[in-house]
Amino acid sequence: MTTLKAVLLMAMWTAAAGWGLVHVGVGAHFRDPLWAVGTAVAFLVVWMVDFAIFFKVAGNRPWEWFKT
């Protein structure tokens, strides 16, 4: 069950970050190298925060659905 909670939190974080990037205007500047590098760094940060959220919420046993 913790895996489901972690995935939902990750989805909410990713959606919020995506919303922010769209409203900053990332899509309008895709040909500018500086914007491209900034967008790539932003995507990496979002990805790393997703990993941190997942392992913080799911703990040491993320894929254990039922206790035996």
Image (cartoon, rainbow, N blue to C red):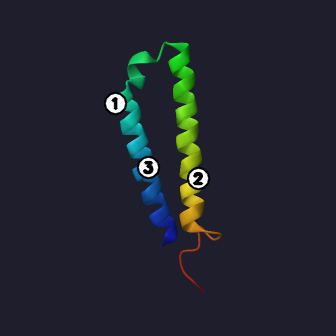
Q: Residue at x 56, y 44 (%)?
A: 47
Which amino acid lies under the numbered mark 1 shown in the image of this protein? His
Q: Which residue reaches farthest right?
A: 60
Residue 20, placed above or below residue 11? above
Identify the disc placed on residue 23.
1
Which residue corresponds to mark 3? 13
- Specify which label sits upstream in the sequence, 2 or 3: 3
In the image, taking residue 19 as reference, residue 42 lies left or right, namely right
Which amino acid lies under the numbered mark 3 shown in the image of this protein? Trp
Which amino acid lies under the numbered mark 2 shown in the image of this protein? Phe
* Distance from the alpha carbon under mark 1 to that under mark 3: 15 Å
x and y, in percent, of residue 60 in the image: 65, 69
Mark 2: secondary structure: helix
| Viewer-side residue, 34 vs 67 | 34
Mark 3: secondary structure: helix
- Specify which label sits upstream in the sequence, 2 or 1: 1
* Distance from the alpha carbon under mark 2 to that under mark 3: 11 Å
Hey, which quadrant is residue 41 in on the image?
Answer: top right
Q: Are marks 2 and 3 in contact (CB under 8 Å)?
A: no
